[in-house]
Image (spheres, rainbow, N blue to C red):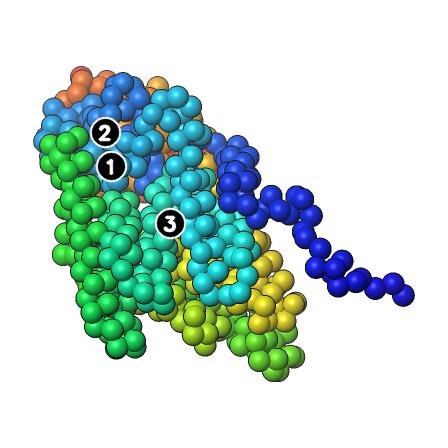
Amino acid sequence: MPTLSSSEAAAPPAAWSRWLRRPVSAALILLLIYVGLSFLNDPHGSLGTDTGGKVATLVAMDRNGDLDPDVGYWAGRFDPETRVHGLYYTSKIGDRYLNVTSLPMVLAASPLYDVGGYRLALLLPMAGSIAAAFAARAIARRVGRGDGWAAFWVIGLASPLAVYALDFWEHSIGVALMAWGAVALYDAVHDRPTWWRGLAAGAAFGAAFSMRTEALAYGFAMIATACLVLWIGRKNLAGGVLTGATAAVGVVALFMANAALEIGVLGTTFRSGRTSGAAGSGGAELALRVKEAVVTSLSPVGSIGAEGFLFGVGLAAALGYLVWCSSRRREPRLAVIAAVLVGFIYLYSFRGGPGFIPGLVATTPLAVAGVVLGWTRPRARLFVAFALAPLPLVFYFQFPGGALPQWGGRYILTTGTILAAVGVACLPRLELWVRRFLVTASVAVTVFGLAWLSIRSHEVAQAADVLEARPEAVLIQPQGFIAREFGATYGRKDWLSTGGAVDIPFAAQVAAESGAESMALVDAATGRDPIELDGWTLQGSEIVHLDLADFRVTTYTRTP
């Protein structure tokens, strides 16, 4: 039987494989894959309402032909307190109406949107995911003995960042900056602390803060961890002080740069106000925060109740036991049972078709491998600490109430990315079938998420077309966020959003004062009976069945 010679066994990889291992070509290939996948989605729909607010801002900027992020308000004269603006969460700052959380994001995307619309603006989140994949490669190279390319492709194509690359959200850019900040701090500890490493890490977290509020929690926890390891673990107090001081300078410098940008464009700051609001509400509704922490950390199902807790904890435990058994070559039968349990939980999660999977562990199963294997590996332990230390702060200060309609724990994506990179680097310690199982699970759940984004974008676009084609002059939406979904068609219809039933009479009053002769109440609470409104004559009510949701549409005309 012929055998390979040593020279043949060590032959270089095929030419096509080499293209996957060169930075420029790998980045271009990943970008082309993202662009191709983006055409499966409707540009008039997105994964969540925050995207709608940002896209509405781009629409307004394009329509006005400038870089002013003012979305305006067609009924501003009649609603001076901005109680029922059609884009929920719109704030009035001076004479501007803002529905955007990251000014640099929309300013950078505006020229792209002007030229190529929403699809071209997606180059920004795509670039963020590519940069995060390179950070994952850097992490894997420091942890393992390989070149880190496996981590690049897993993070780029089989993690939540593949989903967030195709939606106009700033998450991918924020994750990339924070992950590179972690790399700089790691090098300061394991190589040597220098002023420029601390400054680079701080600048990365400061820049990430302009995109994501949780960047301050990640920056504080990671910088503090690095300083403590230098001081206590390596007996290098001077290095710890140098790293902490220069990192603080970097954070403050980028914080001030973002504030200066906001003042230059808007005449005032608003990002710091958002942060102080989050800090002021920290710890409120503690029981809800604990439940949401479990959901966003673990759960494969959209439930804050016992179902989410049971399946989340069960999935994490089964994955952890599977990795532990395989790394020690123990209990092979129990390992198989654990794998079967993991498969069952995923099938249970997929049973109803594509939908939100909110938990980090559920969408990033390799993160569990990162914790189990990385904590026992000296060169990986610091990255694991970087990933886990910020979590209590994030959970304590995150905005409550948004755990379910999200993909992969969007507030803690940086944790998942770092742990998954560590997990990929440690995969050679596992049996081959377990490696394949974990990668297959990562690919499967990511494909599920990409399918959900595609389906949901078409559902949102269909709902916008149907509802905004109605003949009534004004549409009122009591659930608040629904109209914000339709940011891509902002301005096509005059909307008012109340965020609850209590403000419906006020919205009807605003519609009347605007001179509208007809209006419709578009209510997702289909079981609610039609209501009488002062100044309006009830004409009729019907249930409109749409793929996004069913709505009770109640029509009114002005009372003579």
Residue hosting label 3: 176
The one of 467 and 230 positioned closer to us in this rendering: 230
In primary-sequence order, the first of circles 3 and 1 is 1
The one of 114 and 395 positioned closer to us in this rendering: 114
10 Å crowding of disc 1: few (<14), some (14-19), many (20+): many
Image point (52%, 38%), residue name: 28
Label 3, secondary structure: give it.
Answer: helix
Check the image and name the residue furthest to the right: 1
Residue 111 in the image: state x and y as whole percent: 34, 25
Label 2 close to label 1 by CB (< 8 Å): yes
Given the image, on which type of amino acid does mark 2 rest? Pro
Disc 3/disc 1 C-alpha distance (Å): 18 Å
Disc 2/disc 1 C-alpha distance (Å): 8 Å
Residue hosting label 2: 69
Viewer-nearest of labels 2 and 1?
A: 1
Image point (80%, 62%), residue name: 4
Residue 248 in the image: state x and y as whole percent: 19, 56
Residue hosting label 1: 103
352 left or right, relative to 550: right
